Amino acid sequence: MQQELSGVVTRRPKLLVLQLWGLGDLVIATPFLQAASKKYAVTLLAKPFAQDLRDRFWPEVRVVPFLAPWTAFRHKYKLWAWPWGEIFRVVRLWSERYDVGVSWRWDPRDHLLLALVRARMRIGFPRVDSQIFLTHPLARPEPEHHIYENWRVIARALGLELPTREKIPVPPARQTGEVLIHSGAGQPVRVWPLERYKGLIAFLRRQKFTVQVACDPEQRDWWLQAGESSVATPRTVRELLGLLDKARAFIGNDSGPAHLAGLSGVPTFTIFGPQLPDWFAPLHPAGEWLEGKPCPYKPCSDYCRFPVPYCMVNTSEAEVCTRVGAFLARGMPGNRVQRVAVEKMG
């Protein structure tokens, strides 16, 4: 495949990357974007928050913002409500004559879009006969692999080599700063109960940790009423990065902020629910997690069949306090006061 490119193109090849989904998914694509931008002129089609990531992580990548209507959680197929003007604007990218277009998802909608944009080589993982839109269909990694492996497979098809997940370089962890706890997530079923987060925060403050609480906008009033007067509510990725720049550790749900923390060099502890850590753990080598409780429908893609997500609510406050305390003690070996407190708690 690489010989095919080098035999036809004398300029720097133009690569179109489709990553139309959430913040965590885009963060996981970062090692690929960094490697690809050294060899290709990369255009990334992604949600608007990609602009904030671009400035810090892959400044050579051109971002074309696009809110794909099929990525909405609900009512995604109300075709009459789709932003057809925006869709036609994206399709007109065909005039830029991309040499290669890639998609990491086994998603026929992505593959159709690559065909409409007329990328000369179209690389992806086919599903329900979507190989008709691809010129180079790829075999998906083994089902038990982290989704980062999808990018490694695509990279090899382009003559690139990405490090394994365990060897992705991240900035060194800070030795001072706050423990940042973010209680939000993309969907309610991924949110560990706020009352238990409150108990975890009280426990950490008793152990002399400095804790900064952050949350999603819809959670802010709850935290204010709970007495957390300095709760942060980042509304942009840039604001979230500002909080992470002061953090020495991150604790939160399976969420975009957790992934961004890991990539920013902040060790993460993630409380999982309906999804699997083997697939979606943040890309930090010192990251740890607590897997969600058993459910016959896991992983359920956030569409819970029960009145409450038992995979989350059955995880106790005491269990999380114990695991988080040990995580912080391991990550901060110089802090004797906290380490002794954790040992007494255990």
Image (tube, rainbow, N blue to C red):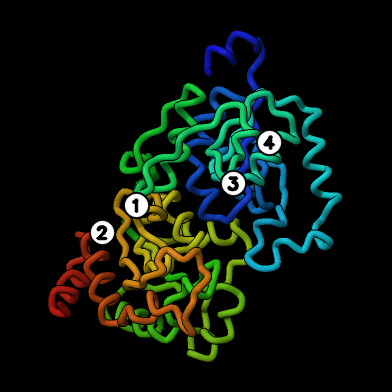
**Residue placed at 40% from the left, 40% from the top?**
141
Answer with mark 3 or mark 1, whichever residue precedes in sequence.
3
Q: Amino acid at mark 4?
A: Leu
Per the image, the residue denoted by label 2 is 331
Residue contact at pointers 1 and 2, CB within 8 angstroms: yes
Q: Residue 22: x percent and y percent?
A: 58, 56
Q: Amino acid at mark 2?
A: Gly
Mark 4 is surrounded, within 10 Å at the Cα level, by few (under 14), some (14 to 19) or many (20 or more) other residues, namely: many
The span from disc 1 to disc 2 (Cα, nearest Å) is 9 Å
Per the image, the residue denoted by label 3 is 107
Q: Amino acid at mark 3?
A: Asp
Answer with mark 4 or mark 2, whichever residue precedes in sequence.
4
Quadrant for the C terminus in the image: bottom left
**Residue placed at 80% from the left, 58% from the top?**
82
Residue contact at pointers 4 and 3, CB within 8 angstroms: no
The span from disc 2 to disc 3 (Cα, nearest Å) is 39 Å
Q: Secondary structure at mark 4?
A: helix
Per the image, the residue denoted by label 4 is 114
Q: Secondary structure at mark 2?
A: helix
Q: Residue 268: x percent and y percent?
A: 36, 60
Per the image, the residue denoted by label 1 is 173
The span from disc 4 to disc 1 (Cα, nearest Å) is 39 Å
